[in-house]
Amino acid sequence: MTRIVVDPVTRIEGHLRVEAVVENGVITDAFSSGTMVRGLEKILIGRDPRDAWAFTERVCGVCTTVHALTSVRAVEDALGIKVPPTAEIIRNIMMAAQQVQDHVVHFYHLHALDWVDVVNCLKADPKKAAELAQSFSKWDKNNTAYFTEIQNKVKKFAETGLGIFANGYWGHPAYKLPPEVNLIAVAHYIDALEWQKELVKIHAIFGGKNPHPNYLVGGVPCSININEVGAINGERLNLVAKLIAQADEFVNEVYIPDLLAVASFYKDWAKWGGGLTNYLSYGEYPTKGYAEVDAFKMSRGVILGRDLSKVLPVNAKDSQEIKEYIAHSWYDYKGGNNEGLHPWAGETEIKYTGPKPPFTSLEGSEKYSFLKTPRWKENPMEVGPLARVLVSYASGHADVKEIVGAVLGKLQVPVAALFSTLGRTGARAVDCALAMNYLKEFFGELMDRVKANDVATFNGEKWDPKSWPSEAEGVGLTEAPRGALAHWIKIKDGAIENYQLVVPTTWNGSPRDVKNQHSSFEASLIGTPVAKLDEPVEILRTIHSFDPCLACSVH
Amino acid sequence: MGLTIWQSMQQKGYSRRDFIQFCTAAATVAGLEHSAVGQVVNAFEKKEKPAVIWMHFQECTCCSESFIRASHPVVLDVLLDVLSLNYTETLMAASGAQAEKSLQDTIKNNKGKYIVLVEGAVPTKDDGVYCMIGGKTAESILQEVSKDAAAIIAWGSCASNGCIQAAKPNPTGATPIHKLVDKPVINVPGCPPIADVMMAVVTHILALGQMPQLDNQGRPKEFYGRRVHDTCYRRAYYDAGLFVEAWDDENARKGYCLYKMGCRGPVTYNACSVVKWNEGTSYPIQSGHGCIGCSEEGFWDNGPFYRHLPKFPGFGIESTADTIGTLVGIATVAGVAAHAVVTNVRKKSVIADVHTEDMKES
Amino acid sequence: MSTTLQPARPTMKKPVDYYRIYVWELPVRLYHGINAVAMILLCVTGYLIGEPHRVFYAAEAYQLYWFGIVRFIHFVSAFIWTFNFAFRIYWGFVGNRYASWRNYFPITKQQRHDIWNVLTTDVLQFRVKNDEIDIGHNSLAAFTYFITFLFFLAQVVTGFALYSSMSTSALPSMFNWIVPIMGGEAVVRFWHHLFMWFFVVFMIVHIYLAFYHDYIEGRGTISSIVGGWKFHREDDDNK
Ligand code: HEM
Ligand code: HEM
Ligand code: NFV
Ligand code: SF4
Ligand code: SF4
Ligand code: F3S
Ligand SMILES: [Mg+2]
């Protein structure tokens, strides 16, 4: 029995430590530990609720935007503010753009190196690579000259030291791609790096900058006026249209084909990494206001025990449904360690009890992470693109079923293959394709509204704190790229009395709960074989399939 | 073999004199004596692209995200040609022990010559347990990597002035880098800083071969020498007194000045209104929201954001200096009036007293 | 040089002798006038800078510069006010005994006694005794002016610190180190704005008290700040 430690887990956001117990080459137990905390829930107390979006947006710069959106929804929910439909569409556009960009960056820059051997691409024949790439994509850079140029770049780079690629697990037997596929993937790694900065210009157009665009309680801060240079006008909308078209091409001609190509060599990973059997999604993209959940593009609900015939309802305001535990987290609750608190009653009293640094192992520490442990009706839940896609699939959304069917068909695997590391990575591509479609659709609707001159972007009825009740409470729910995200707010006398975030990676990456039930990261590692203890690429594959964000999870 | 810095500078038309100047600048950053410049010249001439370590502490990674949004140059060209980024948790291939090896190798093989870029603040409360990497505290890692660094750049408001985690009550004792290392630190504040500004600061050192001129807060004057307000294209409306009075009102749709919506442009030093964000696409004000002052020290505690002045501490959420001032003013007028009344009621005794005295025979 | 005044009420038995004393020299009076005008302008324009009011509708930016003008007035007044104040400090060393800097600090026992006197008699009004009327400032007023001068200084420092970011000329540049020390311009503005209210309150109380003293003491307090002369009772000299 060996305990292997991966710290830092890189190519994620933030500070994650994984300790895994390996017996006879298979992981039998795992510990997922978040090792950085900022205490933002404490910092928010006493602030103006209208400012909260800016604070919470700084929870994460990778999934930037999503906390801001969740926060304004929470405040609007508490105060009963309805945002104008045009503002809702702009928010949807920003959100969908974030999903698409985040998923592509995750695939190429955070996840791909678990499957793609960069150094091995030097052995590829660029001509063959071009032929192969052309067989599954119309992307015009898929040609021999370009692949040769990339190969030369990598060669030159390798000679001067590998920089960010140094000390990777290159040559590890778990890498299975032929050199040509490696070359294609490396070329697109580079292309994706250049492209990712484009789509988020949409955030700059409507929100002034990316990362961290601006939001507004009651609407969006930008005004529309097609007869003014100082507002969202024809020129701005043209730019959005161009960026969307560019993204559409990249997603459908580069990302999805690459994903399918890579995945087809790793079908054995449909066996491992499934982990939990419960899935939670809050649903996303309101089309008739945030309160009308039935009109969301993607459904809200829970799947228990992988039973796709039933989607259970979720009520985030019910004090018995969602609770956070700290039995193994470095916090104190007034009511004791074993209690679970609904977030409206949540507490954030940080108390580190781990070993004194520097340390080599967390073994023997009862508490081992700065993440709290959220549960839905006491059940651990997986959240993320997979959960999102499954809940909408099980709810019978035709567009979701179609794309899932297409992906499974191309890979020739059954639906059950989704419950795995490979399935999680594939579901992200499905989710990205869906978001791309919605993005186009929302933009079309925005143009219709501009044509009809229905351009109000702000509802100011409740802007003035004097119009607020002395006490109010609300919840903002979103589907962030990494899954179900919620903010709970309590407002008293115009100021924040309590503010609690339960974040996708909090669900997935948390330590076990008071009943010793594992959360997603730990559960999905158990049962995975590890070929070389000192190069545990298998751990990275499964952990990365969740796209962990630790700054988010702890906050 | 790849080009040495000297070779690539030669190709770009720099003379040896320029090169020595560059090395002098680098030596100044490293805090070396002038006499040590010769050594540095040799070091750079022989060596490859400068090694760079990017540390992540208490942050949200938005600075990294911003960095990869750069358009001139694009990040890839910099990663491939200008510098050798040997450590950055966000992008590097290696994890765990292999990542640690990359870090140690870089420090060992480039003593006094590598550049440290820091993203994030460092928690100092409770022995630094609030940020740990590989079982070591951020605080100890910062000391370890900065000891032999040639230059330290603090990315973003987190590293430059503490940013959000240092906002009241600063639960973890988040501290900016320059307060923890005894070397000069180039502060590049902003939440995050503008991508092309980050690139320009790096290339200012590596391609122009000069230390950027810094202001008294360690910020490059090039980008932090002017207020957002001074170069804002809405400034004409400000001077004319034409303001947005409410969100999405008629004035907002005309793009008037956002001062009355709480814009912090007048108190914020940054290049947003000139360089702009995302390849010059826009900046907060252009998209209708005021500047929140994200590059200023303590900007989180100077809120709320939708009022021009911070709230007056201790008097509830809506109290401003003006509400307090008005109250005190009214109280004063009332006090003065009461005083006048009392004086008049008592005038017989007060003034009469004087008079009786006056009337005394002498 | 003493003037015999006719008694206020002719039925009174004996007229009291008053004589005129030249208390406020011309520079002090000029200083006072300039100070008063500048300070009112600074408060009004400062308030508008902090809290702009909409005055024009349907105008275009190129037609207007009114906010610029408000700020211009603020800055011009600020410079005048500052130099005026600096001049007054100088005059505190070369002017007459009533202008002397010594008045402003409660250094002597007499001064401290005097402060007590004014507090109990004039401010709180529980004592009826008016035997020690000062010719120049009363000591409490003088001490208050000293406090005021500290606020003058604070306002000048914060004002020029703010101005230093809009100007490269020598005087404002001397203050640019203030900004980081105070924790950024937002903080400097906050204090600069808050101090304004001190001046508003000061002016209310100060003008009231000028009238009050004139009323109670009948020695021409108000006209003195314009003409320079105050009246003094002959019999006070014997005390
Ligand atoms: C009685 C003295 C003064 C008063 C009552 C006063 C009052 C004010 C007020 C209320 C503001 C608005 C602050 C805000 O809300 O942002 C202001 C701004 C300002 N004041 Fe003063 N001030 C005085 C003296 C000075 C002096 C001596 C200077 C030196 C130059 C000065 C320079 C400024 C500057 C530069 C601003 C900022 C204006 C802008 O950015 O447009 N002030 N003042
Ligand atoms: C903005 C308004 C004003 C300000 C800021 C102001 C300020 C001052 C200051 C600083 C002094 C001390 C002078 C020195 O020692 O050089 C003073 C004295 C004086 N001021 Fe004013 N003043 C104002 C308005 C007035 C007005 C309107 C009056 C009368 C109508 C007045 C009457 C006097 C008198 C009588 C003194 C002499 C006080 C004494 O004998 O103790 N002031 N004032
Ligand atoms: N987990 C997480 Fe996020 C996302 N997606 C937040 O809600 O990444 Ni930073
Ligand atoms: S400075 Fe701001 S943007 Fe950069 S890491 Fe810190 S919170 Fe994120
Ligand atoms: S919008 Fe802001 S930065 Fe621009 S002129 Fe107005 S106050 Fe200044
Ligand atoms: S909020 Fe920050 S991005 Fe620029 S305009 Fe203000 S400094
Ligand atoms: Mg939380």
Image: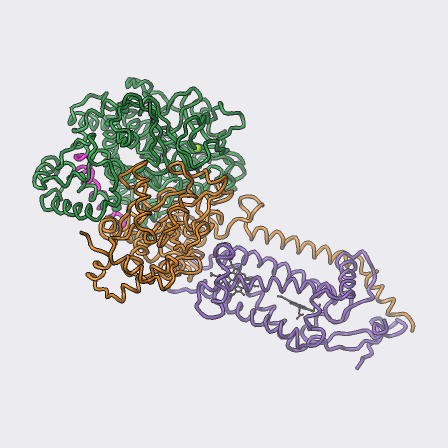
| Direction from residue A500 to residue C192 in the image, left or right | right
Residue A253 on image: x %, y %: 16, 38
Q: Which of the chains is purple?
A: C
Which residue in the rendered view is the most extreme toward the right? B361
Left or right, C33 with reference to A333 = right
Closest to the observer: A468 or C38?
A: C38
Range of residues picked out in magenta: A236-258
- Is A49 above or below relative to C130? above
Q: In this picture, is A39 found above or below B349?
A: above
Residue A96 to residue C37: above or below? above
Give the quadrant of the C terminus of chain A: top left
Residue B3: quadrant of the picture: bottom left
Q: Does the magenta stretch include residue A255?
A: yes
> In the displayed structure, does residue C155 sit left or right of residue A486?
right
Q: Is B362 left, or right, of A462 in this rendering?
A: right
The residue sitting at 50% across, 40% down in the picture is A467
Residue B212, percent from left and from top: 35, 60
Provide the major secondary structure of the magenta segment.
helix
**Residue A66 x, y percent position in the rendering:** 36, 38
Residue A344 in view here: yes
Which of the two residues, A355 or A520, is positioned nearer the viewer here? A355
In orange, which chain? B
Give the total of numbered labels.
0
Q: The chain drawn green is chain what?
A: A
The one nearer the camera, A327 or B92, is B92
- The quadrant the N terminus of chain A occupies is top left
Q: Locate residue A109: give its quadrant.
A: top left
Residue C67 locus on image (x, y percent)? 45, 62
Q: Nearer the viewer, residue B37 or A114?
A: B37
